[in-house]
Image (cartoon, rainbow, N blue to C red):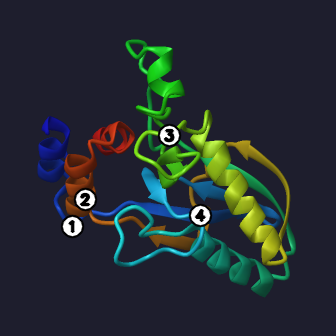
Amino acid sequence: ILTVVAALRTLGPDRTVETAVVQEAPGRIVLVAGGDVMLAAGAGDPTATNGRAGLADLADQTARALALAGTTEVALGVDESVFSGPAVSPGWFPTDVSLGFVAPVTPLQVNIAKTREEPYPPRHADPTLHAAGVFATLLGERGITVTGTERRDAPEGAGRIAAVQSAPVRDIAEYVLRTSDNTVSEALGR
């Protein structure tokens, strides 16, 4: 409850977060996490909270921009710099993560890092790299070969070539209160 109140007061109910792709150089792109832990693996659903923004939509935009530039092969970076601090609280028990009560706190996740669809399933051990892998696969399906993936910050001034927006904070706050999802609450707090 305190996280929801703080987020609504600090960010405002209409605020969304952006997941973007920037091009740092020819053949080098960076997937820039904005804090959306509810990305859909496929197309986004404008009526959903979990899955409002979709990695398939981001891949469509990215592939189009790269094709226009004549690029068919890229190295993929993933920028997580929007969040700071440890991904796992020192006060959490290892079973909290392994049993699915919370995922490591990262700013880029597909479906709240769930490995299957149920209230508290096991979560991906590295939600960011899992999401980057899903994105790389989607790019491959669109004719863009990804030659490697690594964590790296996007350089200042890199040109944005694609972006998707999360659900607004008011919808995310309602989701947290309704489902008591610790992972979404942690991301909202960050």
What is the secondary structure assignment of the residue under circle 4? loop
Residue 10 lies, in percent from the top left, at 16, 48
Q: Earlier in the sequence, mark 3 or mark 2?
A: 3
Q: On the image, numbered disc 3 is attached to which residue?
A: 121
Residue 9 lies, in percent from the top left, at 11, 50
The mark found on residue 14 in the picture is: 1
Report, in whole angstroms, how far the alpha carbon at label 4 lies from the one at label 1: 24 Å
Q: Quadrant of residue 89?
A: top left
Residue 24 lies, in percent from the top left, at 70, 60
Q: Earlier in the sequence, mark 1 or mark 2?
A: 1
Q: Earlier in the sequence, mark 4 or mark 3?
A: 4
Report, in whole angstroms, how far the alpha carbon at label 3 lies from the one at label 2: 24 Å
Q: On the image, numbered disc 4 is attached to which residue?
A: 41
Q: Local crowd at mark 3 within 10 Å, few (<14), some, or many (≥20)?
A: some
Q: Residue at x 44, y 14 (%)?
A: 93
Q: Is residue 50 above or below residue 189?
A: below
Q: Point out the image quarter for the C terminus.
A: top left
Q: Nearer the viewer, mark 3 or mark 2?
A: 3
Name the kind of residue labelled 2 in the image: Val
